[in-house]
Amino acid sequence: MRVYADGRVTLSVPLSWDRKDCEQHLLSREAKIHELLKSISYTPMREEEIERYTHLEEGQSIRIWGVEHPIAHEVRENAKPDAELVDGTIVLTLPENHTDAVRQEALEQLLRRELAEKVEVYRAEAEQKLGVETSGWSIRRMRSRWGSCRWETRRISINLELALHDPSMLEMACIHETAHILAHDHGKKFQSTMDAALPGWREKQKKLNQEGMRLQRWTPANERKFPDRAKNRTH
Ligand SMILES: [Zn+2]
């Protein structure tokens, strides 16, 4: 069973199960589902909003760093999917017959570059404020968290979705994950560390969770190149 940040729940079940088996299984896990929805950054998102970020059609607009930008497509034969910001427009470079997955791959290139640049700055700030050193940072697509920290190895992951929000949200996430090197859970020590490093972080965290996640229906990267394999997945 998977619970997504947009409130969807998917089940993978044996072929022999019928609808009734699935319903019974879901009902038996109802308490667990509510628990998960409470723990993840769950914000019910308008369907139209999710669709816009999934299809990335020309003429639509999406946010980068909290600012709306219109999308333009530039189609070239056999082009490698990529994107850049040109005079405030997100220009997606696409091969012919592009699919949702290809347009997502194009935008992801731009979001990763934007994030990588700012993460460098906020990483240094977080390390300095907290007096710790991290060992490595990566940008990942995550379904339910804004970041994660492996405190044993001091490696930090940042959710790709943060490129859609105001940069101060990324700053907060970088400090939050770095603080986990000092305090592994969200207990008293973590809270006082955050209070000292970034006053007002609680309101910011709340606002970010309310803004929610928009890339939840993106095709998983490992299925982009083999769309036929994706068809066999249960959703
Ligand atoms: Zn945390």
Image: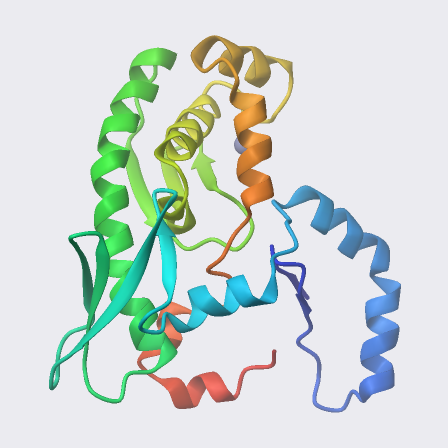
Q: Nearer the viewer, residue 94 or 2?
A: 94
Q: Residue at x 44, y 36 (%)?
A: 150
Residue 103, image x and y in percent? Answer: 30, 72
Count all numbered tags in the image, as a single digit. 0
Q: What's the coloring here? A: rainbow
Q: Is residue 196 left or right of residue 109?
A: right
Location of residue 234 with respect to 72 vertically, above or below:
below
Q: Quadrant of the N terminus?
A: bottom right
Q: Residue at x 61, y 78 (%)?
A: 235
Q: Residue at x 28, y 35 (%)?
A: 119
Q: Is residue 51 left or right of residue 47?
A: left
In which quarter of the view is residue 191 placed? top right
Residue 180, image x and y in percent? Answer: 48, 25
Q: Is residue 125 left or right of residue 7?
A: left
Residue 7, image x and y in percent? Answer: 67, 59
Ligand 1's quadrant: top right
Q: Nearer the viewer, residue 193 or 67?
A: 67
In which quarter of the view is residue 3 placed? bottom right
